[in-house]
Amino acid sequence: MPNLLTNLWDRFLSPPPPPPLGENKISPELMHRIRAVQVRASFLANDLMAGEYVSAFKGRGMEFNEVREYQPGDDVRLIDWNVTARMGAPFIKEFREERELTVMLIVDVSSSGEFGSVERMKNEVAAEAASVLAFLAVKNNDKIGLIVFSDKIEHYVPPKKGKAHVWNIIRTILNFNPEGRETNLSLPLEYLLNVQKRKCTAFFISDFQGKNYETSLKLAKQKHDLIAFIILDPREFELPRIGLINFQDAETGETIEIDALNQETTKRFNESRREEHQNKIDFLKSIGMDAVEIHTHQPMINPILKYFKMREKRR
């Protein structure tokens, strides 16, 4: 048993690197939360999802490896005519898949994430999903970067490799106190296009409670491999039958009162929310963008694994 605990500590709970000079110290409560997320995220990345991630994301393309003699059955289009002329015999170029990726996490920290009706808040689920993706990327020697946004660009971490870098990303996500409260979904997409000139794989993690982002999404999807991780809560689609309910918009502060015992009212509300969500999914499909729906009341791993397997079959 002691060996098992030691292995767990070495594998998951090794202490973080010291914070940079001038950075606020981490509270014991936050340290406990970070370690808990690190344990779960690292376990999923190491034992359950690593192989699926590798199969689903295979790199940007092909890179030159070496030149070798032509063999019967080789593609004649790969003949290196310069080498062939020098050697007096046919030689071909060999290529290998470029495995290394640059992965960007685009994480929504607006106030609409401060909602959860069952077990966890949407922003907690978003942070854990981002942490799992970060561990998967670094485990497979990919660079990982971070864009945190609300109605402004809150923070940017350039892509790097390494466990210390992953720790910094997780700490940033969990410890972040945003200045903005509302959501501007176009802003991080435009920022991504400015800071990431080469094609990358970008996971856009948000509840997508925003408007007028369609054009920016199309442009970013044309340049990058962009995947939407949509964080959802069941109460956003079905009102409880408990009488008068006062709703307050977490971003704007506006309030509205709904009689949840009125069958017609609740029906209109539920249908409207489902239709709005389906329209988002249909739009993403229309531009060729994948969407992974993650619910606060369900295990996070299932939809992510399902997506990885689906993506692998498409390749």
Image (cartoon, helix red, strand yellow):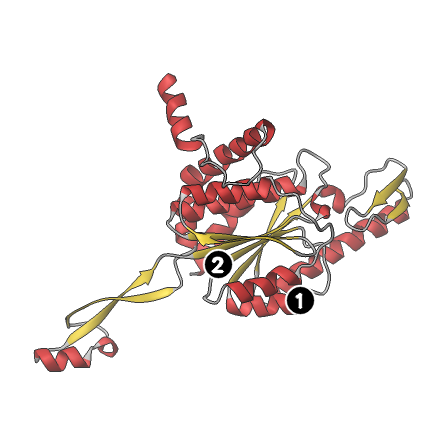
Crowdedness near tag 1: few (<14), some (14–19) or many (≥20) residues, C-alpha within 10 Å: some
Image position, residue 294 (x, y; %):
61, 46
- Residue at x 9%, y 78% (from the top left corner): 87
- Residue at x 49%, y 53% (from the top left corner): 145
Image position, residue 110 (x, y; %):
69, 49
Q: Which residue is mark 2?
A: 201
- Residue at x 71%, y 39% (from the top left corner): 116
Q: Amino acid at mark 2?
A: Thr
| Residue 313 visible, this orientation | yes
| Residue 135 visible, this orientation | no
Image position, residue 260 (x, y; %):
88, 41
Q: Which residue is mark 1?
A: 214
Kind of element beneath mark 1? helix
Image-quadrant location for residue 7: top left
Chain-order first, disc 2 or disc 1: 2
Image-quadrant location for residue 62: bottom left
